[in-house]
Amino acid sequence: MSHVRDTSPKPYGVVAEFDNSDALLEAAEKVKAAGYRDVDAYTPIPVHGLTDVLEWKDDKLGWVVFFHGIAGFAAGYFLQWWTSQGIPVSNTALQVNGLLPYPMNVGGKPEFSIPAFFPPAYELTILLAAFGAVFGMIAFNGLPKPHHPVFNAACMNRASSDRYVLCVEATDPRYDEDEIEELMNGLGSLSVERVMTSEGY
Amino acid sequence: MANNPPVDKELLVGHHTNASLDATIGDIILNPATHNEPAIKTPIKGLMTSPWQIAFGLGFLLLNVLLLSIVMLVWNGIGVWGNNQPVGWGFDIINFVWWIGIGHAGTLISAVLLLLRQKWRNSINRFAEAMTIFAVMCAGIYPLLHTGRPWVAYWLMPYPNWLAMWPQFRSPLVWDVFAVSTYATVSILFWFVGLIPDFATLRDRAKSKFAQVAFGAVSLGWRGSAKHWHRYEHASIILAGLSTPLVLSVHTVVSFDFAMGIVPGWNVTIFPPYFVAGAVFAGFAMVLTFAIPLRKWYKLEGLITMKHIDWMAKVMLATGLIVFYGYIMEVFYAWYSGVPAEMALLYNRYNLFDSPYSWAFWTLIITNGIIPQLMWVPKYRQNMKILLLVTTSISIGMWFERYVIIPISLTRDYVPGSFGFYSPTLWDIAMFAGTIGLFLFLMFLFIRFLPMINIFEMKELLHQMEHDDKHSHDHKENGKLATTAQEGAE
């Protein structure tokens, strides 16, 4: 029952570096074919087809954006309906908090003017949907994360420039460093490295 | 990749690799000495300076003019401006609309061209988006100050308060608040998302500890994981899809500020489309005004190529024609409606001897309607001097478009007793010069500290070009077909 965080170095994975995306795609296919499950790749540009090869799919973001958009639209119309018509209530918590509706007759238009209230609702739809897209992307990606164990690999210095890195992670049930290293060496990689971490992954 | 059409080979001139792209774009920021080049002789003996220093210095100088004019305005009140009865808003609305319009090209390039898979946007989108953000900032200053008490500008927003007072949501001015603030927010988010992978590149490329930590922090620890890229691309395309209707709505709402009024010359249905086209027109002119000198100063001719310039000039020509059509329709409406007030307005616009503002109308027609027609000539689209002449002319013309719309209509409406005259004061002009200063100041700060061309998208372009090459070697016939199809499309 130790309360001290275990910081002894543990294997994080084995990485191989390639100098172009086609070599990476080919290698990823072979690594998957060899039966490894926890595989990720680090590339300077989005490589199309890579997530298909890695058999990884995630469509959550689209739904997050969709529901944010719906929420923005509903909030926009609700705000305008409540403030311009609402339900007359008095002596309630709403009144105390300054949340009472204040109907105004503007040019004889209805209190709840659906067409005139469209632009603010429309803008709020876009605003909230954009929040959903940006912050959803950042959150699902687990960012911000200033340090990640894979940065311990020397080849990651160039993974944002001109190197394509493939990584088999230690969480893989079939993880065996020697076997993976041998496999990766046969895939035309520039170098293969074992990555250690002391972050408790 | 399969559904991407082949890219034009002329979009990237010279031999490039991923590393050389990093160096070309990234080192502009990481090596401060770049900004001391090219050296320009000054009248003071022995003192050399660079375009960056001159432009930044000028921007800083004018920024101070802006601060001074804001102090003057807040201290004395709106009276220091030329606004009067019947011209309740003059330079403030003119400049607001002008700046907002300039911003629109950035969103068009980053969003609409992304949806249309136009790869030529890759080398111009970053600084066009920067222009969007800075132009919206310049625009936002005007309505905030025109409230007279900018410290209570939050009254524009709906918030619970003891008076139970809410904004008047049926007013286009309130729509403006929503549209412009959403536009500013979404533009900044889109810009930041685009910058994340580039920050990671700069973090890995930086030599100094400070730059590494700073870029590391703003990159959010981006590591280019395949899963991250997947969501990233998903988010980008969604943002593009959201920004496209947004950018159309923003200038539409701005045009509603006028079109919803019953003032002669304003109450026309053509305003929304012609404002949006005018915004893109002005925006592309401003993008070119910056792109032409920047590519020369920073030796980016290989990335922002003659092809880019040519295509931007063509977009400018096309949107310019839409705008010109708008002017023609305004004249037609006035005549066809048979409304005396509209006819009188038309007369006030074109009659050179009888009306005080007709010179502005004819300046507009010359600078915005006639001079841009030079862009029909392919040779002129390759001539930097003529291009700069045309873009400057458009910037002036688009400003006069708003000048024609506002004082002419307001000083001559239905009741002769309320006719008036409008002329700007020194502080109107000082504030306008000041916002230009703010824009220059921010643009050159941006060039100093952030990558002005999207690094990872340029790499993507390079990657696709290499793929196209391979593809055409594999299937010569298909390659040929693709080339002919492309030539046909031009």
Image: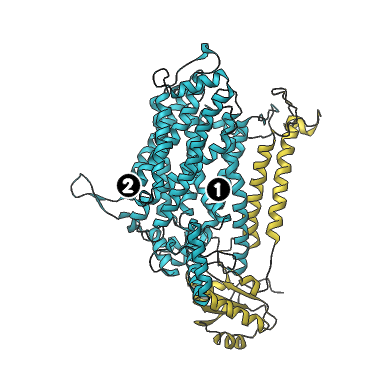
Chain colours: A yellow, B cyan
Question: Is B98 displayed left or right of A96 in the figure?
Answer: left
> Which chain is disc 1 placed on?
B
* Residue lying farthest to the left in this orientation: B45
> Could you say where residue A162 lies in the image, as x and y percent from the top left?
47, 71
Residue at the spot of label 1: B187
> Could you say where residue B77 lies in the image, as x and y percent from the top left?
48, 23
Q: Secondary structure at mark 1?
A: helix
Q: Is residue B412 visible?
A: yes
Q: Earlier in the sequence, mark 2 or mark 1?
A: 1
> Could you say where residue A31 lies in the image, as x and y percent from the top left?
63, 82
Q: Dividing the picture into quarters, in which one does residue A14 lie?
A: bottom right
**Amino acid at the residue labelled 1:** Ser
**A110 or B325, which lies in front?**
B325
* Residue lying farthest to the top in this orientation: B417
Residue at the spot of label 2: B385
Question: Is A70 displayed left or right of B482 in the figure?
Answer: right
**Amino acid at the residue labelled 2:** Lys
